[in-house]
Image (spheres, rainbow, N blue to C red):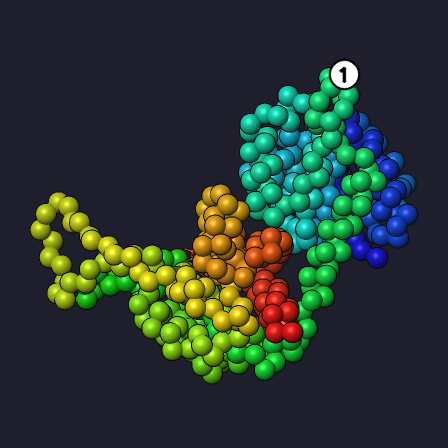
Amino acid sequence: MSNILVGVTGGIAAYKSAYLVREFVRAGHNVKVMMTKKAESFVSHTTFEALSLNPVLRENNTPTPISHIDYSSWADVCIIAPATANTIGKINAGIADNELLSTILALKCPLVLAPAMNTNMYSNTIVQENIRSLQSKGIYMILPASGLLACQTEGEGKMQDPDIIAEKVLNILNSENDLSLKIENDMLSGLTILITAGPTKEYIDPVRYITNKSSGKMGYALAEEAYKMGANVILISGEVNIKSDIPNIQKIVSAEDMYNAFLSFYNEADIIIMAAAVADYFPVYENKKIKKNDNELVLHLQKTKDILSYAGTHKKENQVLVGFAAETNNMEEYAKQKLEKKKADIIAANDVSRKDIGFDSIDNEITLFFADGSITHTGKQSKQDIAKIILAESAILHSEKNK
Ligand code: PMT
């Protein structure tokens, strides 16, 4: 039995959400409903209270002053049906100017949207861009069907039937539960795992260098969780501010150092996970501090060695190779390119345009692209929990390769 939070926004399809709530309750789940003010002009909150047997989170009439936090932390999954163009746009922009949107912003569980609107609104480029952008952030979409709409036009925009939505939401819930069920405490016991973490520093002269925003938190979370799961961990780390009890930490400064450390250890690794943010270019080093002379200073940069590519080309048949992809746009396309080009088994793609995840954040949200074409969204979680999922998936792949 799971806790399902149903959000209803202001569209004519709001009446269908009563059936959706009934489907979930009939399947034995706990259901709570939240409604925007506009949704209440289509269906009364009392309908939903009667069906869900719980108070509805309403605009200006919340069960408690912090209901948006209570409802968001209670939910195992949240479905917004119907999701209007307005709500979709606001979620994508991170706006929280009503109770429903505030609750969504505080969610820790998977979020599913079932858009419904007039065909012209649905085909509008801005709405389509918002939908794609939310999908790339790991938000699930149950896209509308075509048919005769309430506005008497024929076309796309009709909310899917409640039984279809209910089935898809329950599938998402089950697959997310499967992901956490896959994690076993000792699943890495006896395996050697090589992990890279943190930034590299590329010195320009004795006092200046080029680096990036990596704090090392993601790589260290992987190393610590792997260690707890029984692995023999080799951590190759750039300069970071993290204390760790991992016995084997190889501290490096530059991309060249990381490459050399990698060469010393990769042969003995069963699983290799490359979370470090390695410089792609390094400057030609000047032995003496560069003097200030002209208005312009041109730095000549050369390509660093691509460690992930090297690992992919020299990968042994029974080794598992996991690369990361830090992207600000076209995440899926670039991650898939990296998966193929670098011959990795898994690419963990990170949207680093977001401030709440990625570089130097406590949480992360990853989409895993597997060489067999499958894709898994982790949802937003602590870097420790994300690490557990990446490790569990790597361990499962390793045992499949070593059958
Ligand atoms: O350290 P945190 O603050 O916790 O932030 C975590 C993170 C954002 C750094 C991490 O989650 C992440 O995304 N790491 C990969 C960063 C990166 O350099 O991505 P990329 O898309 O530029 O590189 C692709 C892959 O190639 C990465 O696995 C990288 O380690 C590897 N690489 C890159 C360049 C190079 N010369 N050699 C490499 O092996």
Q: Is residue 191 left or right of residue 329?
A: right
Relative depth, front residue between 346 and 46? 346
Q: Is residue 225 above or below residue 107?
A: below
Q: Is residue 214 left or right of residue 99?
A: left
Residue ID at (67%, 69%): 183
Other residues around mark 1 within 10 Å, as few (<14) / some (14–19) / many (≥20): few
For the N terminus, the image quarter is: bottom right
For the question of whether residue 368 can be seen, the reply is: no
The residue carrying mark 1 is 152
Residue ID at (55%, 27%): 125
Residue ID at (47%, 68%): 315
Q: Is residue 203 left or right of residue 98?
A: left
Residue ID at (73%, 60%): 177
In the image, farthest residue toward the left: 293
Residue 344, given in percent of the width and then of the height, sits at 50, 61
Relative depth, front residue between 275 and 220? 275
Quadrant containing ligand 1: bottom left
Q: Is residue 319 above or below residue 277?
A: below
Residue 48, given in percent of the width and then of the height, sits at 85, 39
SS class of the residue under badge 1? loop
Residue 214, given in percent of the width and then of the height, sits at 41, 60
Kind of residue at disc 1? Gln
Residue 204, given in percent of the width and then of the height, sits at 21, 60
Relative depth, front residue between 324 and 5? 324
Count of all numbered marks drawn on residues in the image: 1
Q: Is residue 284 left or right of residue 335?
A: left
Q: Is residue 337 above or below residue 275?
A: above
Q: Is residue 371 above or below residue 40?
A: below
